[in-house]
Each structure stands twice: as structure tokens, then as C-alpha cells.
Image: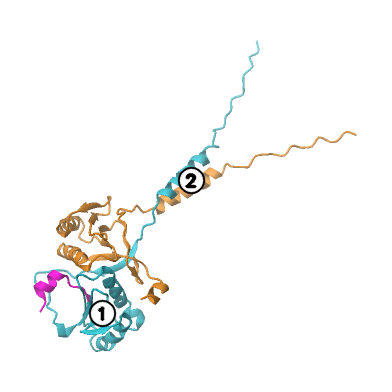
Amino acid sequence: MKIDREPVDDEIPTSSMADIAFLLIIYFMVTTTFAATRGLDFALPEEDDSPPVIEKEDSVLIEIQPSGELLVDQTPMSLSEVLNYLKPKLEVNPKKPVIIRPDPASPYKYMVIVLDELRQAQDKGFEEEIRISIPTQREIESFWY
Amino acid sequence: MKLPESRTAEGTIPTASMADIAFLLIIFFMLTITFEVDKTQVVLPKTSIRVEIPKKAAYVSLDESGRIKVSSGEELSASVAGSEDVFSFAVGVIATDPNKEFVLKADENVPYRDVDQIVDALKRAKVRVIYLLSNERTVDDMAGG
């Protein structure tokens, strides 16, 4: 007796594979948030029990007022003038520290703008990187003057 | 007259390679994705110098209302009460990895006093390098001051 058999399909159905893969891609694209992963690096000085006392006269002091105005060695100055002021002083003594002292009430962005400007010194004709110090309020109260 | 039988045109688009392409895209997304450990919404300050932040760096975020969150870079950030908690957290992180980099993600308008307390806590915990997370400063920003 002859039995009719239906031919068996020997292929794996892959037509939906692309749909699944594209769904996964869409999921990744929707859930990915592009994080800001760059910033201004700042090395903190190693803290010991007796940090070196920096005298006012040995350094340049940049004070940031709450309004964002700058007082460089007690002289009002715009941000673009700061590097020009520092250049002759640092040519005489490249190790002269520059101290940034923001007013506690001043917005954080002004400190960042000043730090960013000073960090660009070498691109603007300075021979060495400026030695920048940003003492915290506790350090100012404990060790300064 | 009998016309020759016309050949039927093949009506399918070859889609066999579609899944391969889609899976390659998925692999690309999976390799390049960096999971954001801190989702605090802040307006970042803008800087010209922006260096790449190492992956797995610890995060301290500070939003405009003064809320602080910390993350060791492995898990999602969690709220802490104040700068003393940041100190304890940083001490714990530095105990496991003394060279761990810290990222400070602070809103540009936050008063510097709040940032100062966090930087002071990190200094006391003997953190060596902090990255001040920033956005890119464009030519328009510089013209605007």
C-alpha cells in the first residue's frame, strides 16, 4: 500500500529574526542616555598634618566676587586680562602659585571659568603650567596667615 | 498565434542578511554603551578644556537645591545628607582603591560654599584627582562672556 507523506520542511524559519533584532536595537536606542563624560581635571594636593604656609606676598591671589567680578591682587580685572597680568610675574618666578579664592556665595561656574582660563596658559604662550591652588574654607581658617 | 509562455518574476526581497546586520548593530551598541550611574539633572558649567573621564570613576553630584548624591561608579547614585557623609563615602572608596578618580557633577549656579564643603571632604579623604564635569564651551559662549 502506498502512503502519501507530506514533504517535511527542513529550513529553520528565520524571517522573524530581523524583527526581533530590530526591536532590540530600538530598545537600546531609546534607553541610552548620552552621558557627559568629559570635564576639567584638578589634582588635589596631598594633605598632611602641616601643609606649607603660603604667604600672601609669594603668590597671586584671585578673588571671585558673588557677582562674578574678579579682584586680582586687590585690583578689579576682567577674565581676559588675568593671563596678561600673570605673564610678567610668572616669567620672573614660574613656580609662583596662583590662588583662586571664590566667595562662598558666588556661583560655582565662576570658579570653573577662572580655573579653565588659567589651565589654558600654556596654549597662550606661557612656558610652564600655572601652579593653581584652590584652598578650601577650612584650610584658609586653619593654615592661612 | 500562440505566444510563448511568459516567465513569472520572482516577488521576494532577499532578507536573509537583515538579521546579521541588525545583530552587528546590537553588538556595536552593547560594546559602546556606558551606563550612567548618576541621573541627577544639572546645568553643567562650560569649559574649553575637557579631558576624558575614566570609566568607573566615583561620582558626587550636587544639584541646584543642594541635594548631594554619591556613587562609587559601580551602582546607581544614592542620596546622602551632607558633606560628612561624602567624607565617609570617599574614605570607604579610597580604602579599596587609593587611586580612584572622583567626578564632581555640580550645577553651575550652586553657591561655591556647597562645592567647597564637598571638595574639602574629598581632600580630607585623600582623594588625588577630581574631575569637574563640564559641557563644551563654544565660541558663542566666549563672546557672551
Let me know if residue A45 appears in the view: yes
Question: What color does chain B have in the rendering?
Answer: orange
- Residue lying at the far front of the rendered structure: A67
Q: Residue furthest right?
A: B1
Task: Determine whether A58 is above or below A50 in the image.
Answer: below
In the visual, does A38 lie left or right of A44?
Answer: right
The three-letter amino acid code for the residue at tag 1 is Leu
Rendering quarter of residue A74 = bottom left
Residue A70, which numbered label? Answer: 1
Q: Colour of chain A?
A: cyan
Indicate the quadrant where residue B119 lies.
bottom left
| Quarter occupied by the N terminus of chain A | top right
Name the residue that disc number 2 marks: B23
Magenta span: A132-145
Residue B31 lies left or right of residue A94; in this view the side is: right
Instruction: Kindly identify which chain the residue marked by label 2 belongs to.
Output: B
**What's the residue at 72%, 39% (across, down)?**
B9
| Cβ–Cβ under 8 Å for marks 2 and 1 | no
Are tags 2 and 1 found on a single chain?
Answer: no
